[in-house]
Amino acid sequence: MARSKRTASPAADPAPAVGSPMVSFRPIEALIPYVRNARTHSAAQVAQIAASITEFGFTNPILADTNGIVAGHGRLMAARQLLDAGLALRLPSGEQITAGHVPVLDCTGWSDAQRRAYIIADNKLALNAGWDFDMLRIEIAELSGLGFDETLTGFSKDELAQLTLDVEEGDTNSAAEWSGMPEYEDAEPCFRKIVVNFDDQASVEDFFARMGQTCTDKTKSIWHPYKARRDVEALRYANDGGAEEPVEAPASLQ
């Protein structure tokens, strides 16, 4: 039996090159923020993003589709702030971006559910990461030695000061000072305790300002409404058969 002659199939369109996403430059005014965006941006954080864009360029395009912004609301706010101040936006290479425009990565094609889920995921996934604080201290210390503005890393001056402390000294490192310390028995049980988590130092300061109270690096808890702390200056811990309890310190030690 004679073999059939194979014909060459028509050449297929070349696949898009990996690493060549659909990035374009769109007018800021054409980008519509998502009205149900659950992520908030304080003025202090927007200023941090603006400072980062000024130093490093627009490293992360805004993610959007034909309906508006999916991710990058904070970057858009920072871009507006810079443009209103008469400053130009630039790419990481230093190339200036056309005035009034920002880089946008197109995600058109997602379902409504995908779009709404990613708006949340884009913010939450990064929060799930942790820090190797020993390595972070090394990096911050070396950046300081290079004369670089460490606040451009996103850490506040107070956070940087805490990071660069010598842990062995334990003078103002609250975690080191409290480690292994027994708790005083709570003489005044509270109605309810809630753990409050903060994203940054600005959030801490805003919270305590709203509470009308002050926060130091040793603050562990507060009362609301405000209640004066129990006086523990004259107490010390004594070990009696393995049980630790506060007792009055001798006058010579007070």
Image (cartoon, rainbow, N blue to C red):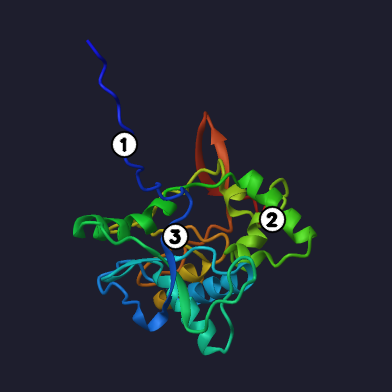
In the rendered structure, find residue 186 and report the number of the disc placed on it: none
Frontmost of labels 1 and 2 is: 1
Residue 114 occupies which quadrant of the picture?
bottom left
Frontmost of labels 2 and 3 is: 2
- In the rendered view, would you say 130 is above or below 110? above
Q: Which quadrant of the figure contains the N terminus?
A: top left
Q: Residue 198's x, y, as percent?
A: 44, 62
Classed neighbour count for the residue bearing mark 1: other residues with Cα under 10 Å, few (<14), some (14–19), many (≥20): few
Q: Residue at x 59, y 74 (%)?
A: 90
Q: Residue 57's x, y, as percent?
A: 59, 69
Q: Residue at x 20, y 56 (%)?
A: 113
Q: Secondary structure at mark 1?
A: loop
Residue at the disc numbered 3: 221
- Name the amino acid type tagged 2: Ile
Foreground: 102 or 49?
A: 102
- Name the amino acid type tagged 3: Ser
Q: Secondary structure at mark 2?
A: helix
Residue at the disc numbered 1: 9
User: Is 112 situated left or right of 130 in this image?
Assistant: left
Q: Residue 69's x, y, as percent?
A: 33, 70
Q: Residue at x 54, y 68 (%)?
A: 58
Q: Residue 175's x, y, as percent?
A: 57, 50
Q: Which quadrant of the figure contains the C terminus?
A: bottom right
Q: Residue at x 29, y 62 (%)?
A: 108
In the rendered structure, find residue 140 and report the number of the disc placed on it: 2
* Earlier-in-chain disc, 1 versus 3: 1
Foreground: 109 or 114?
A: 109
Foreground: 153 or 165?
A: 153
Q: CA distance from mark 2 to mark 3?
A: 29 Å
Q: CA distance from mark 1 to mark 2?
A: 58 Å
Residue 72 occupies which quadrant of the picture?
bottom left
